[in-house]
Image (tube, grey):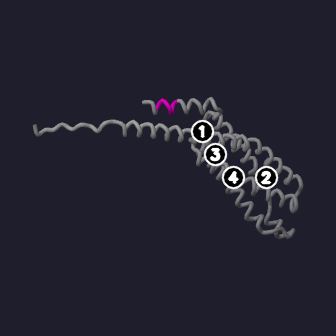
Amino acid sequence: MLGAFALACAAQQQQTAGLETPWDVRTTLANLTKNASDLKPVLDSLTPQQWYEKKGAASTYILQLQTAQQQLRDVAAANAQLSQQTENLPLALDDYFRMEALEFTARSLEEGARKYADRATADKLAELIARNFSNREHFREYIRDLATSTEQNFKIADQEAQRCRGMISKEPPARTRNSHK
């Protein structure tokens, strides 16, 4: 019974210590999804094939555009999955790393657009990448808090398990009835 009480106390402490509610996490994820989806029309307007054919750009921009479009879909799917399980640390980390990869690819495409396309497109891409920064930082803080909370919960569970093992090892062996009297 004390073990359940200890875990309940830990859950209460994580709420008071600053771990966001699932509703707040879902709001952050919705903002991240919205900001990422705003990249789609700008990415769709990029023409790295023409950059390559007409301006001598590296062919890697073609692959990067395809990669960025896939990464947009992956981020949306990861956000949706995490919205269902907001306290799942592996999902949160996967989602964050997908966002980081998308930003990296989008920044490379922004450089290509700045060099081989019009400045307005490159500026728009840079603006959208920057707009998502504060939401991603907020999400990163949530992941850090979630990791800390998860680690604390494991420590509490381990301490409780150690206490229970100690109690069990101190109990006298159970007596068996001798049926041959």
Label 1, label 4: how many angstroms apart (C-alpha)?
29 Å
Label 1, label 2: how many angstroms apart (C-alpha)?
38 Å
Near-viewer residue (88 or 65): 88
Label 2 or label 4, whichever lies nearer to me, is 4
Which percent across, then down, holds residue 39?
76, 50
Question: Could you say whether the residue bearing mark 3 is in a helix, strand or loop?
Answer: helix
Query: To which residue does mark 2 refer?
Result: 42
Quadrant in which residue 85 is drawn: top right
Which region is colored magenta? 4-8
Up/down of 153 relative to 113, above or below: above
Label 1, label 3: how many angstroms apart (C-alpha)?
21 Å
Q: Tell me if residue 7 is in the magenta stretch.
A: yes
Q: Is residue 66 left or right of residue 108?
A: left
Query: Nearer the N terminus, badge 1 or badge 3?
Result: 3
Amino acid at the residue labelled 2: Val
Circle on res. 79: 3
Residue situated furthest right in the rendering: 119
Query: Nearer the N terminus, badge 2 or badge 4?
Result: 2
Q: Do the residues labelled 1 and 2 touch (CB within 8 Å)?
A: no
Image point (41%, 38%), residue name = 166
Label 1 or label 3, whichever lies nearer to me, is 1
Query: To which residue does mark 1 refer?
Result: 149
Which percent across, then down, holds residue 68?
72, 57
Query: To which residue does mark 4 refer?
Result: 72
Mark 4, residues whose alpha carbon is within 10 Å: few (<14), some, or many (≥20)? Answer: many
Near-viewer residue (13 or 40): 13
Mark 1, residues whose alpha carbon is within 10 Å: few (<14), some, or many (≥20)? Answer: many
Amino acid at the residue labelled 3: Asn
Image point (76%, 41%), residue name = 134
